[in-house]
Amino acid sequence: MSNGSRPLSPHLQIYRPQITSVLSISHRVTGIGLTVGTFLLVWWLLAAAAGPESYARAAGFMGSFFGLLLLFAWTFAMWFHFCAGIRHLVWDTGYGLELPQVYLGGWIVVGASAGLTILTWVAALIAW
């Protein structure tokens, strides 16, 4: 039996993205983003230990528009990865595996991540 020119497996061009696949990919991407953000945090801490000039340079970057955008994205990645991780722990117990519950859980992860990110930044602005 010959496959001819047919693809060996379904391709991304065939399937419409679903929340389950988008969240799965996003969970992996936010894990990578958390790693990159952690390097940024380590740079900031090392700059603080290196002295006032190094710290001023790092704080200047963190306070710039691009730096704040990275911090906001890092905050979202942290909350998204946290909420998606809790969702996976719930699945490990055998709950929430029916398709309607999977979709509801996915939207809860998205909403909770956005809400917790905004709440974190509002609390930070109030404290500042």
Image (cartoon, helix red, strand yellow):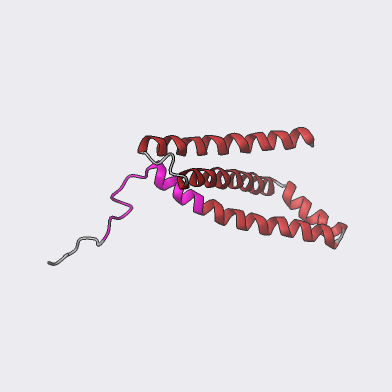
Give the residue furthest to the front. 93
Position of 93 compared to 80: left or right?
left
Position of 103 compared to 36: left or right?
left
Tell me, yes or no, whether the highlighted magenta stretch contains residue 18.
Answer: yes
Q: Nearer the viewer, residue 12 or 86?
A: 86
State whether residue 113 is above or below residue 33.
above
Q: Quadrant of residue 1?
A: bottom left
Q: Quadrant of residue 53?
A: bottom right
Give the residue furthest to the right. 52
Q: Nearer the viewer, residue 97 or 76?
A: 97
Tell me, yes or no, whether the highlighted magenta stretch contains residue 70.
Answer: no
**Residue at 50% of width from left, 54% of height from top?**
28
**Residue at 62% of width from left, 36% of height from top?**
116
**Residue at 50% of width from left, 50% of height from top?**
27
Measuring from the top left, give residue 79's x and y in whole percent. Answer: 60, 43
Give the residue furthest to the left. 1
Measuring from the top left, give residue 42's x and y in whole percent. Answer: 72, 59
Give the magenta part as a residue range: 9-28
Q: Quadrant of the C terminus?
A: top right
Task: Give the tally of numbered discs.
Answer: 0
Measuring from the top left, give residue 45's x and y in whole percent. Answer: 77, 57
Position of 100 compared to 32: left or right?
left
Position of 40 compared to 54: left or right?
left
